[in-house]
Amino acid sequence: MPASTSLNLGQLREQLQRHLRSRSIGTESDTLALLAHGEANAIFRLGQDRLVRVAVNTPNQRFQGDFSRLTTFEWTILRYLQGSGLGHRLLGQKLAPSDDFPYTYLITNYIPGQPLDYSRPQLQRCAETLARLHRLPLRAGYENLAQLTPLVQRVSRPLTLFFEEARDYAQPYLDAPEAEPEIVEMLRSVLAKAEARLASESLLSDHFHECLVHSDHTYENWVIDDRQAFLIDWEWAEIGSPAGDLGHFLSPVTVRRFQGYQLPPADRQFFLKIYYDALEDAALAQKIRIHFTVFGAFPAVRSLCWTAGYWVTARRWYADSLAESASAASRMARLEDSRRQFPQLWAEVMDWLEEPLP
């Protein structure tokens, strides 16, 4: 099914409620309330203890505009993660559109908690969760990553892939009539500097480790309580280098999405130390240090280029939803903030690309 460009969220909730009741999912007394929506999903809370995550669109080029593929993709990942305690528990699914409800969805448990605020206690919990995820293939029952393929992409050349995707994400802005010459020059220079580092990619295969990586560490994709951090929203996941997660988590583009926050260098080092210690494997930690040095900046490059392209494409998606959804209004405000912050973000990513290779 092709991606949708506008959505009546009230109508969607009514359709979903009728559909769920026709399938005896939930009870007459269970409320169905919109919790949040983004460019890919509308998330409803069903009663007190469940979520229904409806795929309504996908800006992710890997799904070719088919949002039912997004649901199947995330269903595959949650099945693999069952029992790991890293995220939602899968409780049900609808993997194909139907006449009574033309969308697909997953039903999971509801996880109480707060989004990431970058305090040190939360940084510690996130580092520990990522370490558990990245060493998961060493744990019995999770070693067979092939069960995730072919739906989940295996990235054997991440620098090359992220560079190519960064270039593609920047293109809508570079082609836009309203593109500002200053921003165009920033995009071209960061792509050139990233391209110059592609020759170091062989170091990743020389120090091989692959695992499931989440790849999208926007603060809203974490739910954190007083004991641990949980990962949600696996739309951008892949099989590949764990440095993809570390790089995206620490990317200035990612961090700024939280109220324009800038992560202090000491907190960056704190996070990395907790992470490497939590791996509980010195040899694995050394491999991932090399991966991070070689590949860590590339998620930031891709996010920076994606941000510029997003200014052009996102307005079409959110424009019709502003009156209905505080979530859409918040994201539009964040869009404007990202434009104001772009020169500083560019400078930080360029500095990261200057760090010496192993």
Image (cartoon, helix red, strand yellow):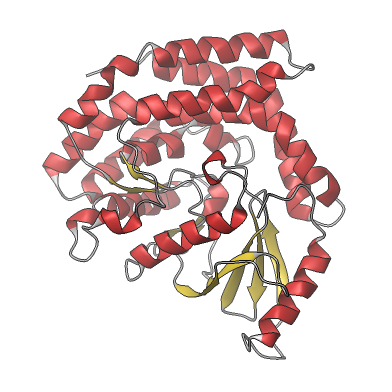
Is residue 224 visible in this depiction of the protein?
no
Compared to residue 23, the image places residue 156 above or below, namely above
Q: Quadrant of residue 311?
A: top right
Considering only vertical position in the picture, is 124 above or below 312?
Answer: below
Is residue 46 shown above or below 310? below
How many labels were placed on the picture? 0
Left or right position of 47 against 225: right
Q: Quadrant of residue 187?
A: top right
In percent of width and height, residue 307 lies at: 62, 30
| Residue at the limit of the structure toward the left, as seen here | 283
Residue shown at 50%/61% (left/top)? 72
Q: Position of residue 144 (x, y in %)?
A: 23, 58
Q: Position of residue 94 (x, y in %)?
A: 57, 71
**Residue 176: where, in percent of width, then height?**
74, 19
Give the camera-side residue of 29 and 351.
29
Q: Residue at x 77, y 67 (%)?
A: 12
Query: Quadrant where the N terminus lies?
Result: bottom right
Which residue is drawn at the image coordinates 28% and 40% (left, top)?
273
Figure quadrant of the C terminus: top left
Q: Which residue is found at the position 33% from the left and 36% from the top? A: 243
On the question of residue 161 being in view, the answer is yes
